[in-house]
Image (tube, rainbow, N blue to C red):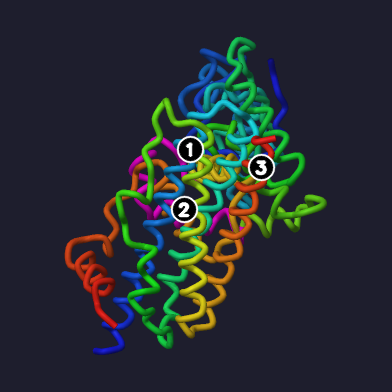
Amino acid sequence: MVIEKHLRVIPLKKIIGTVDKCGELDTKFRYIKRRDRKERFRRAEIHRKTRESAFFPPISVNLYQGDFYVIDGHRRVSAAIENRLEFIDAYVYEYIPESDQAALDGTLAQKRFEVESRVTTIQLSDSRGFTSLLRDLEQFCGDTITREKALKWKSERFLPACRSISNSSLAKHYNSLLPGDIYALIFRFYDEYMNGFPHYNDFDSIISGYLFARGFGRRRIYRRFPFRCIFSLITRKTG
Amino acid sequence: MAKIIKQLVLKIILEQAIIAEEKAFSFYDIARQTVSDPEVRDLLKHLAGEELQHRTHLEELQNSGTLDDMMIPDHNDLSDFEDTPQTWPVITGESTISDILSAALQKEYRSYTAYKRLSSSVKNKTAEAVFRNLKEQEKSHIRKIRKLSAGRQK
């Protein structure tokens, strides 16, 4: 099944192949056999335009198992590589085998999130997490989701929380996941118990609660030896 | 120096309250996994969630840096946070729903009493508001547990 993911910015290093020009291109996406004047001219024009403005029409790519394969725009990719660009605009079509239900669920969840929020810049290693993000976004926005509210959610809630997650011990426990994935995990946990995040002032306390509930918490400082004794002394004090 | 020591004592006291909430969460979480009645399970899950929320609020208060003018509670006001063997029964496969609800009710009464005392003794606006809110939530827990227990007895 092929799912259209619309226009997005993709990392150039993830473009690893071509859909229909196998054997015709070298590793820098230049035609091996077509070195005639017409080809040289076309390539030179694209390279010149890239150097001048770094802007050209988006390419079209297939996304399969996390890597991109070029459908249309090989010369543009070649020009981008030569000019050492890191990212490129692309129309992405994701190919998912019909037997891969998890990938299908994830892609549909991502698409639903992006259509509702019109935010396409969030990356998760497990796209099924987008279901949780969408639910969090719905709770944040209230009645209707607009792009402005979604951007506000992203800047005021999601990104600061991801920074807290990166600085916490959670990143060590879930080292194969991106901070966004861990955020989705935490949200799903709190959603199960209390229909979403409780009101909080500091996301670190949300992380702390999650660490405790999951049994990942380390011994807290005020429970260590000298502090425990102090509490015993306080409660034994006579009037 | 005295101010630092006072801050430290207050944080230690709040830590005891956090421990109490953690134990409550663990009790409710284990209990909800052992009961089959969906209504009871939903209530226990809801109570577990709220205890976790209490923990969050107490931790934020502990880290808030607004404890300067907070009074250290009298040792009598802290007795509800002392851990005793009778505080939490162990949930086994033979624990009945009545046992669980009865233990939950006792726990909620203790918490309600503790936060009621603390809210009147600490003399710090932020802490008072937190303890008052926790007191009201524990009170609502008592109502819900009683209502469920009464409904099951009919």
The outermost residue toward the front is: B154
Could you classify mark 3 by the number of other residues whose Cα lies within 10 Å: few (under 14), some (14-19), or many (20 or more)?
Answer: few
Host chain of mark 2: B
The N terminus of chain A appears in which quarter of the rendering?
top right
Image: magenta residue range: A155-179
Distance from the alpha carbon under mark 3 to that under mark 2: 18 Å
Q: Is residue A45 visible?
A: no
Residue at horizontal 64 percent and vertical 49 percent from the top? B144
Q: Amino acid at mark 3?
A: Ala
Picture coordinates of residue B44, whole percent (x, y): 56, 41
Task: Give the residue at mark 3.
Answer: B150
Give the left or right position of residue B136, taking residue A213 as reference. right
> In terms of depth relative to the viewer, which is nearer, A88 or B130?
B130
Q: Which mark is residue B99?
A: 1
The outermost residue toward the right is: A144
Could you classify mark 2 by the number of other residues whose Cα lies within 10 Å: few (under 14), some (14-19), or many (20 or more)?
Answer: some
